[in-house]
Amino acid sequence: MKKSPADKEKGQSVEDIFRNGFAEAESAPPPRIWENVHREIENQELHRYRKQMIWYRSMAAALLLLLLSAGIIVWQQDSPLLVGQQDTLASGQERSSQKAPAASVPNRPAADVNLPANAAPAIAEAPEMAEASERHVTPEVLVSVPRVFSGKQAQNEDATGAASNSRTYALNENRPALSISFAQQNPKENTATVETLKESKPAVELAITTEAERPVTDKTIQPISGENKAFPRSVTNNLSFSKGLPLGLDSLKGASERSILVQKEAPLTALAQTPPPKKGNEAEESDVYKWSVTMAYSPQYAYAPVKLSDNSAMNSPAVGQAQAYAQYKEAVEEYNHSYTPTYSYAALVGASYRINDKWQLETGVLYTQNEATTTQSYLVYQGGSVLSTVGFDLGSSSGKSAPLVTNAFNNEMAARAITVDRTDRYNTRYRYQQVGLPVRLAYRLNMKRMYALFSGGLNMNLLVQNTIVPETDQVEAVRYGLNDKDSPFRTVQWATTTSIGVGYDVTKKMSILLAPEFTYSLSPMLREAQRQANPYQLGVSIGGRWRLAK
Amino acid sequence: MKIFKPKDPSEADLIKRAVAGKRDAQHLLYQRYAGKMLAVSKRYARTDFEAEDILQDSFIKVFRYLQDFKGDCPLEFWVKRIVINTALKHQRTNRHLMVTDQEEEWDDVSEHDSIDSQFAYEELLELVRGLPPRYQAVFNLYAIEGFSHKEIGEMLDITESTSKSQYSRARASLRQALLRLKQQYHEKVTG
């Protein structure tokens, strides 16, 4: 008590006395408070930095994937020129060594090259030609012919040739007939034909495999099969122009105006005008691609806090000391406040069945890994009699504290006395690994090569493993396996999922899909009824689909 | 809204630098207000240990949310409000473990009995801490901080009339304690 005279301040109210007494009051805080504040600020900054890094990495990965996909798309669009030619040349060579018709290269081009320009319409109108084109050439191929003439033509015709072996003609039979017919019109050009062909190799390839445009007389040409009419090897070697030919596209430029390249345009244009295939083909095609394989990866934000409440262990009568109880409450609050979801992801390998043009059913195997961290500064022990510096019972038989969640939700532990001690702040990592079976119904909206996919469904997840790993030696790490009786978490968990995605058909068989998705848990994470927030996950699924044959 | 402009321009600069994460600026701000704020938190806490915890949590919040400080009041008020809120939160959390003494039956002390002595800070602090937790908070908020009973009701999630009645009881208790202290002092002096 101050020794001031009592009459100095007369008639003061209670409020005045306390207000004056507390005015300008200051207490020197111990230095450790600033140290703790400083450490906590650094932790927060580090945590924020880590979160940003994870986000940036995810974005970078997604961007990389998109760029990669775009690259594939561009490559797929550009490659037919080269691929077609390579295929043609290579296959031509292969066939030349296997079958006689491949060796007939020099003759047929010779015949074609020497055809008069006005022969083209006649070729197009020929019944045999029209028939061949209808049978073997698809509309897409034909439409693309004028744009990438040589390559496409070579490719298409190669395919056509491969599909109709029965229409392969023997060189030794058609050569004389062709030579005679053209020699009559332009003998000089005819003799120069071989030279021209030597220079214009792609033209040679076109001639190798084009069946429909051969206006040779039926009398002189007889179909043979490779098996029953083998071409002599010596002749094959002599006549095989395509052997060792360079594959450069620029070789096309050197083609003479009177070469096959010019003359092919007319028949191919005629082919392009042929009516589209019958409806029956379309139906057949759609049947072929009813099944797809789906693979997807979803980085996601998984909000699944396991909140501790007043129903926790410390309400049990085993807890004696009020101060320990206070600290436990603080630990619980600290846990609840610091629970932060970290980088989580889901990976799906699935199958999709196309019900019709719009609807499809999807299922598969879904692996989900959700992670979270907490920052705590308390240690919780069960039982023991070690006395801490603050006077509470400390220590368990192992000398290590148990994670707070384990204490709070384990009934056996709850019955035992719990002691609490303060320590340096430490992080604890929580990992939930689930394997699930998703069933989703999806609606597809086509927009040329792009499409939108709306899907929704149900996930049944099995919690195969849960690990709680504190980043300190003072607390034990805990791991719960599948169907672990000690685990406070439910083994089977149900969730609804919905997504809206945008896809792109890279090829006829392959497409990529980018789909933000939302998964909302229908069942609680914990076995016992606890007042918990409903877990949910927000993610972006990045994946691909590969269509399979029926 | 009237925007408060700090008299000391260096405070604005300190705030700016502290928001930018400059540790030296944060430390200076802490040094500037920690002493006063510890005194505030002591009034709401039951022990010095708890008061230090409140102070620590408060300053963590201060630096976390400093970027949201609009400057429409002095920084000291803003920090003090955070300290008070943190203290009340601590109190709510620890409500179940507070060993609440049976409420004393206070004798009616006549308002005419004048309390004309000066008391030491520690003595007054001891008296406030001796109140039941809810009364302690209500008394601090009304008598020292100057909040209305309506505001106190909202802050403590109680009705306005409850706040009034609790304040009245707290006041009576403190008055009685002050008179007791005065009497002890008088006995010491007179021998």
Image: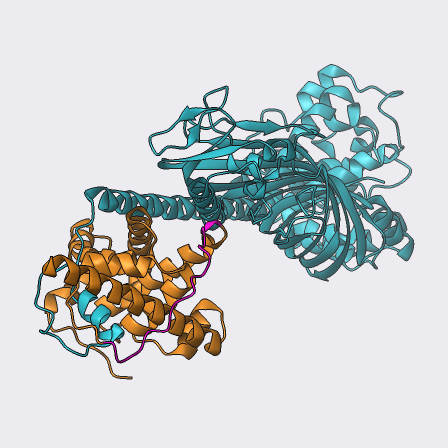
Chain colours: A cyan, B orange
Which residue appears farthest toward the front when viewing the image? B191
User: In the image, residue A548 lies at what x, y percent?
Assistant: 78, 40
Q: Look at the image and give the residue range highlighted in magenta.
A: B97-113
The residue closer to the viewer here, A546 or A96, is A546
Q: What is the quadrant of residue B29 in the picture?
A: bottom left
User: In the image, residue B145 lies at what x, y percent?
Assistant: 29, 71
Q: What is the quadrant of residue B90 in the picture?
A: bottom left
User: In the image, residue B113 lies at what x, y percent?
Assistant: 25, 76
Would you say residue A37 is visible in this rendering? yes
Quadrant in which the C terminus of chain A appears: top right
Count how many numbered circles sit on residues in the image. Answer: 0
- Relative to A171, residue A438 above or below: below
The residue shown at (68%, 53%) is: A144
The residue closer to the viewer here, A145 or A526, is A526
- Relative to A189, residue A479 above or below: above
Quadrant in which the N terminus of chain A appears: bottom left
Prevailing secondary structure of the magenta residues? loop
The residue closer to the viewer here, A390 or B131, is B131
Q: What is the quadrant of residue B122 in the picture?
A: bottom left
Would you say residue A111 is visible in this rendering? no
Q: Is residue A245 left or right of residue B146?
A: right
Q: Is residue B64 left or right of residue B158?
A: left
The residue closer to the viewer here, A166 or A9, is A9
Residue A165 lies in magenta, yes or no?
no
- Relative to A441, residue B186 above or below: below
Q: Is residue A208 left or right of residue B51?
A: right
User: In the image, residue B40 lies at what x, y percent?
Assistant: 26, 61
The residue shown at (79%, 34%) is: A162
